[in-house]
Image: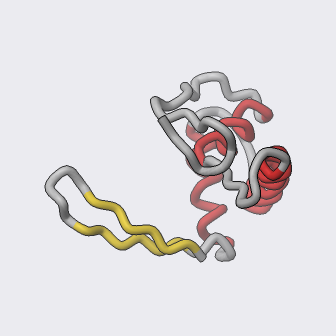
Amino acid sequence: MYETYIFDLYGTLIDIQTDEEKQEVWDRLSLHFGYQGMSITGSELQAQFLRERDLQLAKAARNCQYPDFVMEDVFRSVARQLGGNRIKRGYMKRLDGCGHYR
């Protein structure tokens, strides 16, 4: 489970907890893929996500001691594998796979 703290533009602290082990998370995410014409079950999405995440972590581990992955890049890659082409690259780009952004 990830615990994330986000501050909005006004400095309000938002606490987000997501349990990626719950099947409901993946079932709901798969609906969003379906809305974009990419048919996949929650279980299939979870498996593809984990495979792609592990590939990114392995690649990043070649360059640094504490590798990290960018969740958006993992989902973008999964979407492309499913034939999605509407997902645009975000404004933040990972520099080296070690959690550094510009």
* Image position of 73 (left or right of 56): left
Q: Nearer the viewer, residue 49 or 59?
A: 59
The relative height of residue 77 versus residue 55 in the rendered view (above or below) is: above
Q: Which of 30 and 79 is in front in this view?
A: 79
- Which residue in the rendered view is the most extreme toward the left? 10
Q: Which quarter of the rendering shows the N terminus? A: bottom right
Q: Which of 46 and 63 is in front in this view?
A: 63
Whether residue 46 appears in this view of the structure is yes
* Image position of 4 (left or right of 75): left
Q: Which residue is drawn at 19% across and 64% down?
A: 12
Q: Which residue is drawn at 59% across and 43% down?
A: 72
The relative height of residue 88 versus residue 57 in the rendered view (above or below) is: above
Whether residue 41 appears in this view of the structure is no
Task: Please state the horizontal and vertical placement of residue 87, each as a whole percent of the image.
Answer: 58, 28
* Image position of 2 (left or right of 10): right
Task: Please state the horizontal and vertical placement of residue 17, each as a whole percent of the image.
Answer: 47, 74
Q: Which of 50 and 97 is in front in this view?
A: 97
